[in-house]
Image (tube, rainbow, N blue to C red):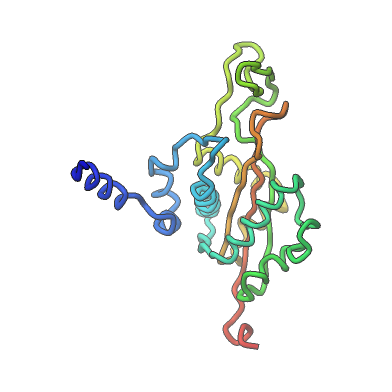
Amino acid sequence: MNWWIVFQLGQWLCQITSPQELYSLSDQAFFAQSIALQPMVLNKPDTTLLDIALFQATNEARRLAGVAPLQYDPALFQAARNHAESMIQFDYVAHEDFYQLDELTLLKRIQKQTHRFGRVAENIGQYQTLDTAEWYGIRFNTRRQQYEYLDAESKQLYQPYNYAQYARYAVSQWLNSPHHRANLLNPAFTHVGCAGRLSRAPFKQRRAPFGRLVQNFGIQRLATQISR
């Protein structure tokens, strides 16, 4: 066995930034990381990196709007992740989860994880994961048995966003909606959990692959309220 290779591999693994470290970075520091610029592999996405990118893009939007950044909260994240996974698994886009009645509403989903928040809000969205023009062509590749999405004139294939681009694109869509924008930029909210899950069979449908994304916002209760 080549112990030098094993040693070098161990050194490399030790240098990998943990998810918690990536959450603790400022949005500017995070988006300067090469890891944020990795193209999304739609058949096998790094969902942890996607969740972190959504969190950082949320705080980037708040910073640019002059609003204080939100803190990452694991309970809000878990509620967001569960809902994003449910929307992909059962193929729907809605705030109500009729497939899992113990997680029917936002409040139920969050209170299943924690009772620390006195006020909560949720943004959801479905956004495609390919950077296409508004109108694009579709063809079926019989050799690969999948659809391809291309510029109708040049025939150039459209490629997936990288993690930074996709997170920023999703946040920009929320900002373009008055209700979602009000949640995202609300200075009263102090904590957030963000999660996204991608379509299970990318390139197997005529429509472009997509992600279903969730932001859960919260304001913590006072300690005296929690104890009651």
Q: Quadrant of residue 98?
A: bottom right
Q: Nearer the viewer, residue 35 or 99?
A: 99
- The answer to whether residue 64 is left or right of residue 83 is left
Do we see residue 164 in this rendering? Answer: yes
Residue at 53% from the left image edge and 41% from the top image edge:
45
Q: Is residue 87 above or below residue 153?
A: below
Residue at 38% from the left image edge and 40% from the top image edge:
34
- The answer to whether residue 181 is left or right of residue 77 is right
Q: Quadrant of residue 156?
A: top right
Q: Quadrant of the N terminus?
A: top left
Q: Nearer the viewer, residue 115 or 10?
A: 10
Residue at 65% from the left image edge and 57% from the top image edge:
82
Q: Quadrant of residue 206?
A: top right
Residue found at the far top of this picture = 153
Residue found at the far front of this picture = 1
Residue 51 percent across, percent down from the top left: 54, 51
Total marks shown come to: 0
Q: Quadrant of the C terminus?
A: bottom right
Q: Is residue 158 above or below residue 127?
A: above
Residue at 69% from the left image edge and 20% from the top image edge:
138
Q: Nearer the viewer, residue 10 or 158?
A: 10
Residue 135 percent across, percent down from the top left: 70, 22
Residue 102 percent across, percent down from the top left: 75, 66
Do we see residue 65 in this rendering? Answer: no
Residue 74 percent across, percent down from the top left: 54, 64
Q: Nearer the viewer, residue 224 or 149?
A: 149
